[in-house]
Image (cartoon, rainbow, N blue to C red):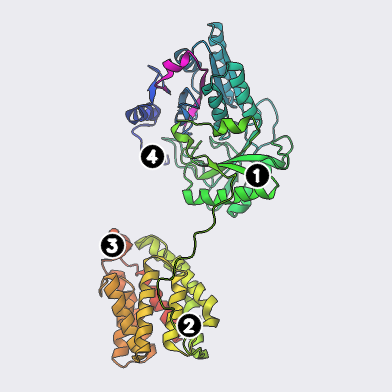
């Protein structure tokens, strides 16, 4: 049997109870209903006499939903079932009985059969006991055709329903109006998600459902099948697909031109903030290009699917009734920051003031086609070497060396026609400019320093050999590296020594290659590899040193 997916848990059967205990260990705004995995506002007794109680919940594994939305202005309590399993009717009834007062209780339920039945049973029992209750079912998933009695699945758009109902309840509205606010929001929201990987349940074997470059468009928040699988597509294409399904599919959300829209970009579990920002960028643009108004934006983890790498987009039509409810204050910790996009973005910051830095001279502007051709060959070789450099750096560093060198090579190639290739000092300054504007990171900074120092040495009449020596010395001084530290210097220093010994360029570049190859057995004393056990990279060359050797060998060819 395959090993279970790696999780920070003690035992699969204990994870929900221990999550509740952990939440109560740090969040003093919450309490639990005794004997149940139910979290409620600690001040629920003070509110039950005057405000409608709002309960939601369902299976766990979707955190921060639903307990993260318990707080003033949103939910009164959250009823937590097992992982991806509906809570029992008994648990739901316990929550209703605990937090409800004379104003009554509203249940907000995602459209899954188990949730509908168990919340429904509890509602009927509560009503029979004299507690005013209503239930609003949310089915906002626009991924699949709406057919049969199951209807559309409830996913992240439910958070907008919580917010609208919670704001109405906080105002002291009666149960009928609070329920109507929830129904209005549920009727005005549509959602769709895309998964790059399936989720992994505690104790279950690691899923290989979406192996390689396969993704699933419309996968459910429990890993249910979506609309289709396909190979990975650009982020903008996926955003357009999701929004197109929500707004253009028959029977789903209809947004008249000029409508204001709130957007929720939701992390389904393992998607980085960087990726969410890329998604948000296109989502806002898509909405505005449609003649709608992207007026509000939420971005972050709101309703996850355990560790699924994926994202969902929810769109809410901000009617004059709903907009103030969405904008209203809430103390629920997971609500995050509601970004108001109604005003135009601020202008870019002004250019930095003149600090008195003298631009490097453009020199004579003379051209030397032979030198230009050598630079072209070296830069092209760096671009072509990206996959190999990346593979080496994944073993010994952070995996970015290949892409960093590729960016520098591409920028040099793009700028090459403007280089004064016949004026050594000005040429080195211009290459340094290209490196500065493209590479970044430690490697980019070290190479720029070396090039600037080399340019000054060449201008002082020290020739190419003296320029190389000055650049290497500057790299050691500012970077702190030494021979044998497993860095670019282990290729540059042998090349410098060969030139100082009067050897030709071919011999010098061979010395660089030999030095780079020698890093295979060196202990890293600088860079990210310094943090890695030597056993992990023994026999693997330093990618920075190899990049130097690749560049100069291509030039010399």
Reading the chain from its start, which is encountered first: label 1 or label 3? Answer: 1
Q: Position of residue 174 (x, y in %)?
A: 58, 16
The N terminus: image quadrant: top left
Q: In the rendered image, which residue does mark 2 sit on?
A: 375
Q: Is residue 498 something that shows in the picture?
A: yes
Circle on res. 7: 4
For the residue carrying disc 3, how many other residues have a C-alpha within 10 Å: few (<14), some (14-19), or many (20+)?
Answer: some
Q: Is residue 49 magenta?
A: yes
In the picture, measured across the screen, residue 190 lies left or right of residue 204, that is right
Gap in angstroms between the C-alphas marked 4 and 2: 50 Å
Gap in angstroms between the C-alphas marked 3 and 4: 28 Å
For the residue carrying disc 4, how many other residues have a C-alpha within 10 Å: few (<14), some (14-19), or many (20+)?
Answer: few
Camera-nearest label, 1 or 3 = 1
Camera-nearest label, 1 or 4 = 1
Reading the chain from its start, which is encountered first: label 3 or label 4? Answer: 4
Q: Is residue 191 magenta?
A: no
Q: Quadrant of residue 148?
A: top right
Which structural element holds mark 2? helix
Q: Position of residue 476 (x, y in %)?
A: 28, 75
Q: Where 481 falls versus 310 (above or below)?
A: below
In the picture, measured across the screen, residue 470 lies left or right of residue 136, that is left
Q: Quadrant of residue 109?
A: top right
Gap in angstroms between the C-alphas marked 1 and 2: 49 Å
Which residue is located at x 34 percent, y 84 percent?
468
Q: Are marks 1 and 4 in contact (CB under 8 Å)?
A: no
Camera-nearest label, 4 or 2 = 2
**Extent of the magenta region:** 41-60
Gap in angstroms between the C-alphas marked 1 and 4: 41 Å
Please state which of residues 401 and 75 is positioned toward the viewer in this rendering: 75
Gap in angstroms between the C-alphas marked 1 and 3: 50 Å
Circle on res. 530: 3
For the residue carrying disc 2, how many other residues have a C-alpha within 10 Å: few (<14), some (14-19), or many (20+)?
Answer: many
């Amino acid at each position: 049997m395959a090993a279970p997916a790696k999780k920070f848990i003690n035992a699969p059967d204990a994870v929900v109870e221990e999550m509740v205990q952990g939440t109560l260990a740090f969040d003093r705004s919450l309490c639990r209903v005794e004997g149940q995995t139910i979290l409620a506002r600690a001040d629920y007794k003070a509110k039950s006499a005057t405000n409608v109680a709002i309960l939601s919940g369902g299976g766990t594994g979707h955190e921060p939903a639903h307990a993260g939305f318990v707080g003033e202005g949103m939910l009164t309590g959250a009823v937590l079932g097992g992982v991806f399993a509906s809570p029992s009717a008994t648990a739901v009834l316990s929550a209703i009985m605990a937090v409800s007062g004379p104003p009554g209780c509203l249940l907000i339920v995602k459209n899954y059969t188990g949730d509908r039945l168990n919340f429904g049973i509890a509602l009927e029992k509560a009503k029979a006991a004299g507690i005013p209750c209503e239930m609003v079912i949310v089915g906002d998933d626009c991924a699949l055709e709406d057919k049969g009695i199951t209807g559309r699945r409830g996913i992240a758009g439910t958070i907008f329903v919580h917010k609208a109902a919670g704001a109405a309840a906080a105002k002291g509205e009666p149960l009928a109006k609070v329920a109507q606010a929830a129904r209005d929001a549920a009727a005005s929201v549509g959602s769709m998600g895309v998964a790059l990987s399936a989720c992994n349940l505690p104790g279950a074997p690691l899923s290989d459902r979406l192996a390689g470059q396969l993704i699933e468009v419309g996968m459910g928040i429990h890993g249910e099948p979506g609309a289709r699988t396909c190979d990975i597509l650009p982020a903008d294409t996926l955003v357009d697909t999701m929004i197109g399904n929500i707004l253009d599919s028959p029977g789903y959300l209809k947004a008249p031109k000029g409508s204001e829209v709130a957007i929720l970009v939701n992390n389904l579990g393992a998607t980085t903030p960087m990726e969410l920002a890329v998604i948000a960028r296109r989502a806002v643009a898509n909405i505005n290009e449609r003649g709608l108004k992207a007026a509000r934006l939420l971005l972050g983890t709101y309703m996850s699917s355990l560790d699924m790498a994926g994202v969902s987009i929810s769109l809410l039509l901000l009617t004059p009734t709903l907009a103030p409810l969405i904008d209203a204050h809430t103390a629920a910790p997971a609500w995050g920051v509601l970004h108001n996009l109604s005003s135009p973005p601020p202008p870019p910051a002004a250019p930095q003031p003149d600090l008195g830095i003298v631009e490097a001279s453009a020199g004579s502007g003379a051209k030397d086609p032979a030198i230009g051709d050598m630079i072209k060959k070296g830069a092209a070789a760096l671009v072509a070497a990206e996959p190999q450099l990346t593979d080496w750096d994944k073993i010994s560093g952070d995996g970015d060396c290949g892409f960093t060198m590729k960016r520098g090579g591409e920028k040099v190639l793009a700028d090459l026609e403007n280089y004064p290739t016949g004026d050594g000092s000005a040429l080195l300054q211009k290459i340094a400019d290209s490196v500065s504007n493209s590479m970044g990171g430690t490697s980019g900074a070290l190479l720029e320093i070396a090039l600037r120092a080399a340019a000054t040495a060449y201008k002082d009449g020290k020739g190419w050999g003296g320029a190389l020596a000055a650049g290497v010395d500057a790299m050691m001084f500012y970077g702190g590296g030494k021979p044998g530290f497993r860095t670019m210097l282990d290729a540059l220093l042998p090349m410098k020594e060969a030139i100082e010994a009067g050897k030709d360029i071919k011999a010098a570049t061979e010395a660089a290659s030999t030095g780079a190859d020698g890093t295979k057995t060196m202990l890293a004393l600088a860079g990210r590899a310094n943090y890695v056990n030597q056993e992990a990279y023994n026999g693997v060359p330093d990618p920075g040193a190899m990049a130097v050797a690749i560049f100069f060998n291509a030039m010399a060819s």
